[in-house]
Image (tube, rainbow, N blue to C red):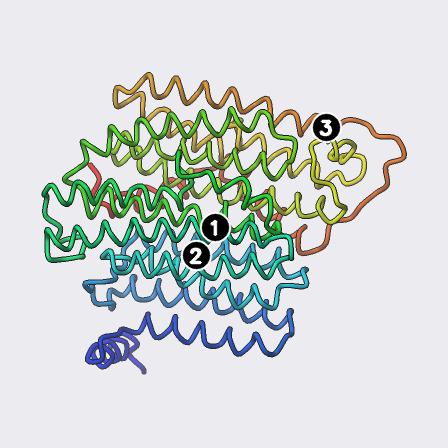
Amino acid sequence: MLDFSTLWNTLSYAFANYGVYPLEVIIGLFIFLNIVLFFVRKPRLQLLVNMLLFAGLFAASSFMYLYDIYPQTYILSINSFSLFFAMLFTVSMALVNIMASGSDEYNAFAMFSSFILSGMYLVSFAGSFVALIIGLELMVIPTVLSILAGKPKSIESAAKLFIMSSIAVALFTFGAALIFGSSFSLSFAGIQQSQLTLMATILIVAAVGFEASIFPFNLWVPDVYQGSQSYITGMLGGINKKVGFVALFEIAFLALRSYSGTFTTIFYALAILTMFYGNIIALAQKNVKRMLAYSSISQAGYILIGFAVATNYSVTASVFQIFAHAFMFIGALAVIAHMEMQNRHEVNDYIGLYSENKFAAIALTIMFISMIGTPLTAGFIGKFLLFSSAVYHNMLPLAVLAITASVISVYYYLKVIMAMFTNKEFSKKSRMRINLLIVALICLIVIVAVGIYPNPVISLAGSAASALNMT
């Protein structure tokens, strides 16, 4: 009988002599196969292969973690934290691929998505700033290219994302250089406290704040979200932004833990500013996708509460909210994609949707009430955990302000919900494409199921937080 553990260890040591490990080889083969498929130009085959590749990539990572046969290296490390987000990114990217499969541009996106997911895995498994820089770039550059491939009008959105990401990379690289200059190491475990490290911390948080759409580094978000194809917007708000938070977790709680006091003050202020900025500006929006962009910014503010409190409970809450919002956002964009196919973009264009397509209206309504934080939805559980973590840690003002921000959000969500359930004369029945229907239905099931029985996800989120050695 073949001993997989012995075989894997043998491969590990063999590859190690050349400075690489099996996971890197799997990712390389994963990308290569997608490039080959790009020239085949068979969307259904590409979708099927991508689903199998995504599942294979996560299965290989899980196998290495469960059997403890992956050497913990200077660059990469696998633990329950990285595996949780690898699972989330894999499932989310699969949903986005299903969304995109009905578009004419899927041939290109299928290839780009392999690069993007590989970058996300590198960030999740990062053990040093080297992996973070490579992973973030491997995610951002193909994202820009996928926006360009979407439609001619997306050039402006792609340009804005490219320029802002270039600035973020410059800040991140300079910060990493300062850390190396003070510690002679880029490994999370080898960083020493100094004045240079403190300056580097500010630069790196600003750079990662761009990816996570934290105020004031989120000015690019509304224009890019609005100008991109709906499946790209779903990926940007549902997955890419979460990668920024994963990097922020690793920086704040692994690499620069000695500055926890400084981080608490910074994240406290950023959480308040981000929540209120996103919600207040969203009130004035008429374009639904742009409104969701500002809503996404406000959700980033809620997630930052976990960083400000900085306990195992609060980080668990943030991880849970990241999980919940990924499905809420992607599910909402599936319905919005259906509306955009009919050239309906504004809030008033949603009038009568319930009489046209009951499932679409109900699905979008549940996504929105979950974002508000209504009971029996995943969004309620996430917000309850976050707000209660602030109360338990004697940060009552932060909890009160967060609840106030949530109340503000009710207005613009209800504005769309009321439009959908308003009667419209001569409304015609409309059907969602099967790929959009599948995505919306899966997200709907997850949101309701986790809202009713959240214990499994809370347990996984708690295990992920524990890997960060939170107290």
Question: Tag 3 or tag 2, which sits nearer the N-term?
Answer: 2
Q: Which mark is residue 161?
A: 1
- Closer-to-camera residue (293/98): 293
Q: Which mark is residue 54?
A: none
- Closer-to-camera residue (239/466): 239
Q: Position of residue 28 (x, y in %)?
A: 39, 74
**SS label for mark 1:** helix
Residue type, mark 2 in image:
Val
Is residue 23 depicted above or below 301 in this figure? below
Q: Position of residue 387 (x, y in %)?
A: 37, 25
Question: Tag 3 or tag 1, which sits nearer the N-term?
Answer: 1
Residue for point 59% across, 78% down: 39
| Front: mark 1 or 3 | 1
**SS label for mark 2:** helix
Distance (Cα) linking label 1 and label 3: 32 Å
What is the quadrant of residue 185 in the picture?
A: bottom left
Q: How many marks?
A: 3
**Is the Cβ of the residue at disc 1 closer than 8 Å to that at disc 2?**
yes
Q: Which mark is residue 140?
A: 2
Residue type, mark 3 in image:
Ala
Residue type, mark 1 in image:
Leu
Give the residue number, with chain letter if any, for mark 3. 419
Is residue 237 depicted above or below 383 in this figure? below
Query: Which quadrant holds the N terminus?
Result: bottom left
Residue for point 18% across, 31% down: 261
Q: Position of residue 142 (x, y in %)?
A: 47, 62
What is the quadrant of residue 394 in the picture?
A: top left
